[in-house]
Every structure is written in structure tokens, then in C-alpha cells.
Image (tube, rainbow, N blue to C red):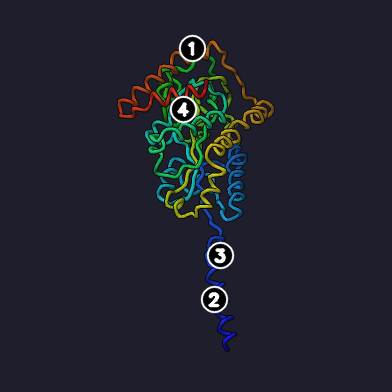
Amino acid sequence: MKKVKIFSLMVCLFFVLSLPMAVSAETITLSFADQNSDMSWGPVHATQPWVKQVEKATNGRVKIQIYPNQTLCKGTQVWKAVKDGIADMGWFLLGYAPGLAPYADVITLPGLPFKTGEQGSEMLWKLYEKFPEMRAQLGDNKILILHTGSPMILLMPKKPVRTLEDLQGMKIRSHGGPIIEVYKKWGAVPVFLPMPDCYMAMQKGTVDAIGALYEPIPGFRLHEVTKHITENTPLNAGHMVVMMNKRKWDSLPKDIQEALMSVSGLEGSKFFGLNFFDSAAVPIKKMVQEETDISIYTLPDEERQRWVDVGAKPVWETWVDKMESQGHTKAREILNEALSMMR
């Protein structure tokens, strides 16, 4: 009888000691809100591979369920949806929320001397790491990745754009930020519009052009409503964020947090910049040239400089003045740091 009691106690002790291990080994499933089509270039080449990286880094203890095509919430509402816990994670275009992160908007100033999304993403993350003021503005959610695209091109459904004068009175899709003032200086009319609404707007003539990249063209079928493309324009680069609900983040075990950040942060930001946008340009441009009758025009450097002088450079100073007048006293320092990084 005594041996039976000892054996029973040992079994109970083993069961109790194994509880933390069993609990920690449970799979954690996180919802991910995404406005983008799960068939478009960025999600296929960046978001979905990153999800697999997370699963590998956590040894399968974290699973991420992506909800594409605005099925969980509208693209413009993803930041708030994650903050409120409607989604655990999400991909969000910061231009949808003007005033949310004014310091991060520095990367969207037109005419900045970077050429690729990977370069822009590296700069943005390093600025985020260096300036606590920037981190504070993005403090409502746990920031995992900050990334950019390369400077945008113009897509037109009807009228081509080859000179500054062609922009006069044109209604051009914008997603917010400093580019709005640039369009005004060029004589154009900015129209705030999420990417999922661009197809219909171009088809109906609600807009005369959209600022975009090659990446969303096939995913949003923009080649069906585009007749002309103008490259080498000194437009802005958009800035995006992958973030997580802070309460959900705080609930994760420490080792899971570390594993998640091992594929996020600087390297994750560069990964998104490279694979979400940069890698799309050559194959999608080739598709456009071979499978459509879209005309592609490259703005000559001297014409591009006219656009820079008239609209881009003045907005740098306007941005600093506006920021300082609103109490954002680090604006010039952040701009100078960004320019220094680029050089």
C-alpha cells in the first residue's frame, strides 16, 4: 500500500510539473487584418513568407491567420481595429491616418534621395529606433515592422502626363501626408482614396490619375483601367506598418516575443521593403508591356527637376515649419538625420 501511495504521488508530481510545459506548448493563433488581395504581389512575396518565418522562429507555437481583402475590417480602420483588439495584428498604410505619426511622415517627403523600398525601410526603422519621440507617436500599438515602397509612379486612365503643365487641374489619388501639398503646388487636386477603391474611381473618371507602384497593378487589376504610366516622377513613397495589439503582445511568453522580433525589427522591415515592392517592379512592368497596350513614359531628368523645384523641395521646409508650429520640435533634426542616412 505504501508503494502504491508513493507511486501515485510521483505521478501527480510529474503531472503538475508538466503543466507549464504543456501550457507553453499550446499553439497561439493570431488574427491578421489586411486590406490587400491575398493574390497580389506584396502579400505573396512578403506578408505570407513573413508569417512562415514567424511560425518557424516560434517552432510552430504561433500561427497567424491572415484576413485579406478587408474581410476583417476596412483598410483605413486597421490601426484602430488592432488597437481595439478586433484584430491581433495588421498591415496598415500610415497615410490613411494623417496626424497619427507626424515624425514618421518624414520618409514620405517627395524628392528624397532614395530609390528603393529596401533603402527607405531601413532608414525609417533606424529613425524609429533613434528617436523616442517617433516611437511615442506610434505607441498605441506594438510596432513590429516599418517599411516603405520606392517613390511612386503615375497611372492614368485617359490622359497621359509628360510635363508639369499636364498636371494642371488633374484629380490625383492620394493617401494623405505631405504629398497632398505637393500636388497642390503642381496645380493638381488631391483626392483621398484607399487602394481598393482605385479601380472603380479610374473606371468612372472620379480621378484622372493615381500615385501608385507596380506592385498593386495585377492584384487590384489596375491594368484593366490604365492607359498611360509615367515613371521617374518625384512623388513620395508610402510608409506602412505591421503592428500588434499591445495587450496581446504583453500576454505572449517572453521567448515568443523574442522569436517574433527576431524576424521583425530592422531585418523584417528591409525584408518587406524589398519583397513587397522592389521585387515586383521588373516582372510586373514586363507583364504590362507584353500583355497590355499601356504606354509607359519616363520623365526626362530635366523635366523631373522642374517638378522637384516647384513642388517637392519647398514642401520640406513647409513640413518642418508646420511640425514646429504644432510643437513637434524634433522635425528638423529628424529630417537632417534622414538626409544624412541617405548620403
Residue at 49% from the left image edge and 32% from the top image edge: 126
Q: Position of residue 216 (x, y in %)?
A: 57, 34
Tell me the crowding category of disc 3: few under 14, some 14 to 19, or many 20 or more residues within 10 angstroms, Cα based. few
Q: Earlier in the sequence, mark 3 or mark 2?
A: 2
Q: Nearer the viewer, mark 3 or mark 4?
A: 3
Q: Quadrant of residue 322?
A: top left
Q: Earlier in the sequence, mark 1 or mark 4?
A: 4
Q: Which residue is mark 2?
A: 12
Asked whether, in this view, residue 4 is left or right of residue 184, the answer is: right
Which three-letter amino acid code belongs to the residue tagged 3?
Ala
In terms of secondary structure, where does tag 1 sit? helix
Q: Position of residue 250 (x, y in %)?
A: 44, 52
Looking at the image, do the residues carrying marks 2 and 4 touch, with CB atoms under 8 Å apart?
A: no
Q: Nearer the viewer, mark 1 or mark 3?
A: 3
Q: Earlier in the sequence, mark 2 or mark 4?
A: 2
Q: Nearer the viewer, mark 2 or mark 1?
A: 2
Q: Nearer the viewer, mark 3 or mark 2?
A: 2
Q: Nearer the viewer, mark 2 or mark 4?
A: 2
Q: Which residue is mark 3?
A: 22
Q: Position of residue 319 (x, y in %)?
A: 38, 23
In terms of secondary structure, where does tag 3 sit? helix
Q: Nearer the viewer, mark 1 or mark 4?
A: 4
Which three-letter amino acid code belongs to the residue tagged 1?
Arg
Q: Earlier in the sequence, mark 3 or mark 4?
A: 3
Residue at 45% from the left image edge and 55% from the top image edge: 251
From mark 2 to mark 1, how far is it between C-alphas? Answer: 79 Å
**79 and 207: which is toward the camera:** 79
Q: Quadrant of residue 327?
A: top left
Q: Which residue is mark 4?
A: 108
Q: Which residue is mark 1?
A: 306
Residue at 42% from the left image edge and 44% from the top image edge: 141
Total count of labels:
4
